[in-house]
Amino acid sequence: MKPVQLFCWHFMAYPYLDKDFDEKEYTGWVTVPNRLWNNSKARGLYQEYIDQLAYADELGFDGMVLNEHHQNIYGLMPSPNLIASALTQCTSRGKIVILGNLLPLHMNPLRVAEEYAMLDQMSNGRLIAGFAPGGGPETFNYDVPSANTREKFWEAADLIVRSWTEDGPFAHEGRYFPLRYVNLWPKPLQQPFPPVWIPGSRSPSTMNEVAKRGYCYFLSSRSHGGETHKAQQEFAAVLEKHGDQYHPFRFGILMSTYVAETDQQAREECEEGVWYFLKNCLKGHLRRVGRQLTYGPGVPYIPAAAWREYLKGYTPGRKLLGDVENWEELEASQSIIVGSPETVTRRIQSLIEKAKVGNLLIQFQLGNMPDHLARKSMKLFAEKVAPALRQESLTQFTREFPGMNVEQSAEALH
Amino acid sequence: MSGRIIEVNQRKVQILENGSGAPLLYLHGFADVHSVNEGWLPFHDQLAKRARVIAPAHPGCAQSDEYKDLDAIEDVVFHYLEVFDALKLSEFDLVGSCVGGWIAAEIAVRHPEKLRKLVLIGAAGLFVEGALIGDVFMMAQPEYGSSYASLREMLFASADQPNALAMFPDGKGEIEDEVRRYQMLRLGSRIGFKPPYFYNRPLRNRLHRITSPALVIWGEKDNFVPRAHGETYAKLIPNNGELKIIPGAGHSAHVEKPEETAKLVLDFLGK
């Protein structure tokens, strides 16, 4: 058994928007005017963010997480593989998690297979390979038809893994990506292939596809109430149906945190960054003001029957994370956990206890949070929060999952 | 469910039929029978007084089975060739609105011999430089999580008119109406999302193949398919009069001005 794995996730937000952004601009996604990009301010921004991730490696985090976004202020990583490449050169220990490359946006999935294989070699086997289908905004950014995105996604994911594991050349007789000669150079270093993580938002079909292939399921929700625990139970049940067993490292969640010396100081120091993140970065994604592009009838990627089920429980105009109006509401969402090391430890501890989750992917830098504060929070977390979480979770996991070999990676099932 | 179900190539197709006389095939668009309303609209009732109106639901719409291998407009055309065979229709009048108008035009350029007369109402399908067809997908994402005003604005002359509000109300509509709207968007995504949106570049250079008389009708203020598309259709289809404009209507002229639009159509068809 091993303790909870703590990863540092960086979204690389655009931090230089004026204070009246929310008032003046309709959205932070897809159509957010790029005249707002300020070159004199943005010079050196990528370096600052890469250095923060390298610092996470120094501090002993188990890994660093990147993901892919296009045409928004929420995440400036159209190609996370470029940042991952830089990390292979300035870090030495932690896993490099890319969660993930958006497969339906790529003309040819082999390119992803090749780049991931290169990254695995360049990082000495530290890659965790994430695949994601992309959501509503990407549909518009890259002009990807929705109705068959999921099928296309799984064909691409399976082709990539096959290209890593099966000797080439072979022909891929696929519907979406037919190829005559699949013959990967280089191969990935990790054998039989790097761990694969797939994000989902509790859809049974995604859980099923993930379980079928023995991959790790990552819950993409940003809020953690009872739903997180439910997702864990649902995934565990799906694994069982496939003759497999749940353990904490089959599951991961995304959360945000800020740690300072005291509760009050934590709130004071992070509040500006937190509101920048909620009101600007989430506008167009997890806010009802403007037009939320992430999920809706205009991005019809689920079958009509599933849409009918969704409508039954849906309340139009309900509040999303970015619509919280005050600090108390934000605290209740359990999305951003802010406080002293004691407070943060206690709250994350209770989340792990309930959700039996082994992979915590934690966002430290929020919105326009300055470098020195992000680093201070990361350091306090690493020194004052992480040790207790590791110790407690190890005890919990050993008790709850006795005799389970979690080092047996999902891939060994193949 | 209304109408009947026929089967083509192991796929169910829902058909509504009303009236008697020579067959008139109607292909629906976004604000229409099958894609919002379960049954006929006043426009179709008018047509059915003079003709046998047959309205199939597109693949994946209403009670028609989804056609999973459907990627492009070409697949829709072949689907309809099978429907015509199943219905034993060899020569008929073809009326299409919006996306249905696009499908009608694609059928007409391939099989002009099947058509007695062709009517296009606010038809998508053409690439007209500088006049992109609107983004109905983005507009279908509600504002504030509940307002469909910009979708209504796109599909009608104004967002506040009663027929627009009845079809696309704010907040939570009837679940089955919303599901039909969703199904139509899903079909739209298959054939019209890429390239953006709803056109087939080669169609324009094929329009000269249409031999039947044609009538092109456009709403005065179409915010979805710009009027330049109507002008292009009218110019390039050989046996065609001038573009007919319905005053005060938007994209969905047949819903907004059913009497006037139906009269134009019936007069043209000689009914």
Image (tube, coloured by chain):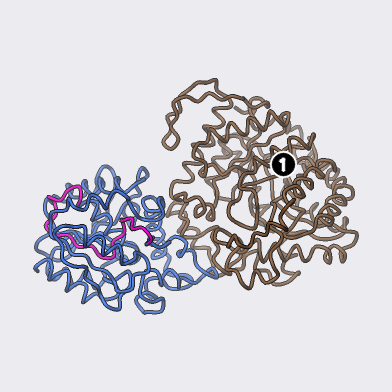
Chain colours: A brown, B blue
User: In x, y percent, where is residue B115?
Assistant: 14, 54
Residue A239 or residue B74, whichever sits in front: B74
Name the quadrant containing residue B268.
bottom left
* Residue plotted at (65% across, 30% down): A118
Classify residue B219 as left or right of residue B141.
left
Please, which residue is most extreme toward the front here?
A40
Q: Residue tagged by mark 1?
A: A248
Q: Amino acid at mark 1?
A: Pro
Q: Secondary structure at mark 1?
A: helix
- Vertical relation: A176 (above or below) A71: above
Residue A40 or residue A31, whichever sits in front: A40
Residues shaded magenta = B109-130
- Vertical relation: A150 (above or below) A170: below
Name the quadrant containing residue A397.
top right
Dot 1, how many residues are within 10 Å of its Cα: few (below 14), some (14-19), or many (20+)? many
Q: Quadrant of the N terminus of chain B?
A: bottom left
User: In x, y percent, where is residue B9?
Assistant: 26, 42
Number of disc labels: 1
Residue B218 or residue B176, whichever sits in front: B218
